Amino acid sequence: MMNPYKSQKAVIEDIIQETENIKTFCLKPEKPFAYRCGQFAELMIPGVGEGPFAMSNPAHQPEKLQFTIQNVGYMTSRLHNLNKGDVLGLRGPYGNGFPVEEFYGKEVLLVIGGVGFPPARALLYSLLKEKSKFKRIIMCYGARTPGDIVYKYQIDEFKKDIELLMTVDKATADWKGTEGVVTVLLDKVKVDLANAVSVVIGPPIMMKFATLKLLEVGFKSKDIYLSTERKMYCGIGQCRHCMIDSLFICKDGPVFTYKQLENLPDIWE
Amino acid sequence: MAEKYYVGKAHWKSILNGWMEKYSVIAPQRENGGLFFQPVSPENSTTIVYNEARAVQPLKSFLTPPLSEMTGDVAKSEKPWLFLGVKACGLAALPILDQAFGGDFPDPYYQQKREESLIVSTDCSVPLETCFCTMVGGNPYPVKSFDLNLSQVWDGFIIEVGSLRGKELLEGHDRSLKEVVKEEEEAQKKIRAKAVADIKTYNKNFSFDESVASVVAKSWDSPVWKKHSETCVECGACNHACPTCHCYFLDDVTRKDFVKLRGWDACQYSGYAVTAGGGTPRPKLFERFRNRYFCKFKYLKDNYGMLGCTGCGRCFEGCQGEIDMRAALSDLNK
C-alpha cells in the first residue's frame, strides 16, 4: 500500500524574486509530477513544516515545477530563506483542478487578485495549449500596487495571446493604468453571457467581491468557478481542516462553482 | 440465523488463555473509578470487566494513536490486538474511521492495525448516566461490526459469531461450546431490555432522537450555540474523547529530515483553522462549538452516511465546563 504521507524529494533549481515578498521557486522533482491545472501540492521543508501550494508551471511540464509564494507566515518565511540546491519534500498532486473541457467553445474570463496569478498562470498555459478551443480568453488582474505585480517579465507575452486588463489598488507615480480593485475592470469587459464562464482566484475578500460583481453583471452561479483555500494539513480528505460545510476543499475542490457554495455559510472566511 | 453458543465460566477461561497466547488481548479493567482498556495477561485476566459501560478511551486511541510517526515502515504485529469488551457505541464509530482512513488515499498504518486486529464485543448491561446510545439510533448491545459478541448471562456468555475470523477464534473449543437454550436467550433478552430501560430513565429529562440531525442542520443561527458554549474552556477534551472525531495535524517537529508526525487535533482550539495570513472561518468560540455539532450531525453524515455521534457520552463526561450535549440537543429540539 502506498504511504500518502511520504514526500518525494524536489531540489530547488532556481529562485526568481518576483516582488519584494513574492518568490518563484523552480523545483526539479525526483519523479515527474504530472498534474491538472488548478490542482495543488503539499510542499514540505524538512524539519520545519508543510503546506498546500498551487503549481504555476505548465501542467504539461511535469519535470520543471514552479511555485510562486508570498511570504506571509511561519512556513512561507522559512521558504523565502532557502537557497538554490536546497531540498524540499513534495507530495500530491491533490484536488480536482479546473474542468478545462467544460470551457470549450466559450469565452473564458479570469478574475485574478494578487498571488492568485500563479494558479491562474497554470490555467492560462493549459488554455493556450489548445487556444482554438476557446472563443475568447480574457484576464482581469488586480494587484495591491505596481510593485506587487508578479510575472512582470511575461505580461507583454501574455498580452499577445489573451486580452489582459490590469489594475492596482494603489497607483504609484509611474503607473499609467487603471487604479482600483479588480472589480473595476469588470465594467470594461463585455462578454457574451450566454456563452461565457468566469474563474475567480485570489484572497477571500477579493473573491467575494469579484463573485458578487460577476453575479451583478449577469453571470449565473454555475458559470463562476472559484479556487478556494483554507487551512490544510493532509490534502487527501482526512484531517478535515479545510472543510466548507461537508465539502473537502482538498478533495472535492479546490475548484468549485459558486452554485456549489452559494447556500453554504461562511464561505468567504 | 446468527451462529450462537453458550460457554460457561470454566470453559471461557481456557478460551481466553488460548487467545492470550496468540494475541495481545486488550480489555477493560477498573482503575481510579473508571474502566480503561488495558493489556491482559494471565495475572489480570480475572479482573476484566465485561458487562459494564464503555471504557474511558475510545478505540481510536489504538487504531490511530494521539501521536504517531507516519513515514516509517508499516509493520505487521507479531501479536495482533484482540479488543475484548468493546461496546456497541464503540463499534458504531468504526465505519466512520474506516471510511475516513480508507478511500482514495488509505492510511496504511490504520489499515494494517484494523485488518489484523480482532474485536470481541460485549453487551453493555450497566449503562452510565451519561449514556444515550438509544437516542441516536443505537442500542447497548452489539448487532454488527464484531468478530464475536459476548452477552454475559448468569455465570457465562452467549457468544454470537459475527465473522469468519471470529469463528476461527473458537476453533478447537467445540466441546466447551454449548447450544444456547431458551432460558439463556430469555435471560439475555431481559438483561438487554433492562439496559435499554435504564438508559431511558437516565435520559428522562432530554427529548430528542436520531432525527435531531436534521434539526441541527437547520439551526445555524440558533441562540443555543452561544448559550451552551458559555462555560467552554476550549480544552478539546470532547474532541479527543470522542470515538468518531479524527481530525489531525501533521508536523515535522522531530526536526529530522523527512520524518512526519501525526497528532490528534481539536476543532474547539482557536488555532485549529487559522491560515498563514492569520484568518480563520471560526474566530468565535460559539462558532467552534457549533462546528462540532454540525460535524457530528451533518458533515459526517453527508460524508460517510452515518451520524458522528454514537451516544457514548464521553464528550460531556470529560467536559470541564459541564456542557451536556443532550441538553444542547434537547434545547435545539424545542
Image (cartoon, coloured by chain):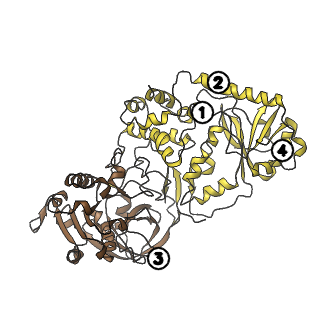
Chain colours: A brown, B yellow
Point out the image quarter for the N terminus of chain B: top right
Task: Name the residue beneath numbered marker 4.
Answer: B15
Query: In this rendering, do the residues under marks 3 and 4 share a single chain?
Result: no
Disc 4 element: helix
Query: In this rendering, do the residues under marks 1 and 4 share a single chain?
Result: yes
Q: Nearer the viewer, residue A196 or B265?
A: A196
Give the number of the disc on residue B133. 1
| Residue B54 locus on image (x, y percent) | 65, 36
Q: Is residue B65 visible?
A: no
The first of marks 4 and 2 along the sequence is 4
Label 3 to label 2, Cα distance in Å?
Answer: 61 Å
Can you say whether B72 is above or below B23 in the image? below
Q: Looking at numbered disc 2 in the image, what kind of residue is underneath it? A: Asp
Local crowd at mark 2 within 10 Å, few (<14), some, or many (≥20)? some
Query: In this rendering, do the residues under marks 1 and 3 share a single chain?
Result: no
Quarter of image, res B130: top right
Q: Nearer the viewer, residue B186 or A68?
A: B186
Q: Looking at numbered disc 4 in the image, what kind of residue is underneath it? A: Ile
- Residue pictured at 24% horizontal, 51% vertical: A212
Give the number of the disc on residue B198. 2
Q: Say whether residue B141 is left or right of residue A79.
A: right
- Residue pictured at 72% horizontal, 54% vertical: B80
| Residue B283 locus on image (x, y percent) | 35, 43
| Residue A41 locus on image (x, y percent) | 43, 65
